[in-house]
Image (cartoon, rainbow, N blue to C red):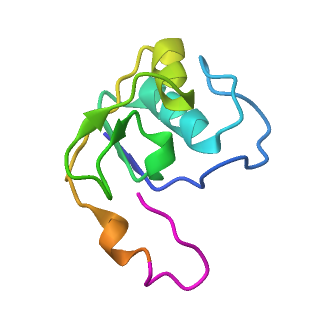
Amino acid sequence: MAIGNPPFGRVRRSANGPRYRGAEFEFHVINIAAELADYGAFILPQQSSSFQYSGRQYYQRCKTGKETDFEKATGLEMTCGAGVDTSIFKNDWKDASIIT
């Protein structure tokens, strides 16, 4: 099992994941972890998941975007785990306002 809270966004790195070639660091971490583990759980910003949950009235799958492109390129599927809507804390952050 792989568990992670990777850095988000365009972070400098020395190589790509085995199947992902894009710019988002969190996707490289997930792609590499998939080579090492059968199951993974990751904290990701809402805009990097292939579903919308936080700050919404209901769970909804994305049909297009960088997150669905990632799933197509890697064969991996992101699903909602614990189901914690973190948008209720967005005004409590000190330096950033990230919905995960």
Q: Quadrant of residue 39?
A: top left
In the depicted view, which residue is nearer to us: 73 or 16?
A: 73
Tell me how many marks there are: 0
When the figure is inspected, residue 16 is found, relative to residue 85, above or below; the finding is: above
Across and down, in percent, residue 70 comes to 53, 24
Q: Is residue 21 left or right of residue 91?
A: right
Q: Residue at x 69, y 23 (%)?
A: 21
Task: Look at the image and tell me in which quarter the N terminus lies.
Answer: top left
Answer yes or no: is residue 27 visible.
Answer: yes
Magenta highlight: main SS: loop
Q: Residue at x 54, y 14 (%)?
A: 73
Across and down, in percent, residue 29 comes to 55, 39
Q: Residue at x 55, y 86 (%)?
A: 94
Q: Residue at x 50, y 42 (%)?
A: 48
Q: Quadrant of residue 23?
A: top right
* Residue most extreme to the front: 57
Across and down, in percent, residue 98 comes to 50, 65
Residue 94: within the magenta? yes
In the depicted view, which residue is nearer to us: 57 or 71?
A: 57
In the depicted view, which residue is nearer to us: 89 or 22?
A: 89
Q: Quadrant of residue 95?
A: bottom right
Region in magenta: 91-100
Across and down, in percent, residue 6 comes to 53, 53
Task: Look at the image and tell me in which quarter the C terminus lies.
Answer: bottom left
When the figure is inspected, residue 97 is found, relative to residue 59, above or below; the finding is: below
When the figure is inspected, residue 61 is found, relative to residue 92, above or below; the finding is: above
Residue 49: within the magenta? no
Answer yes or no: is residue 79 visible.
Answer: no
When the figure is inspected, residue 5 is found, relative to residue 51, above or below; the finding is: below
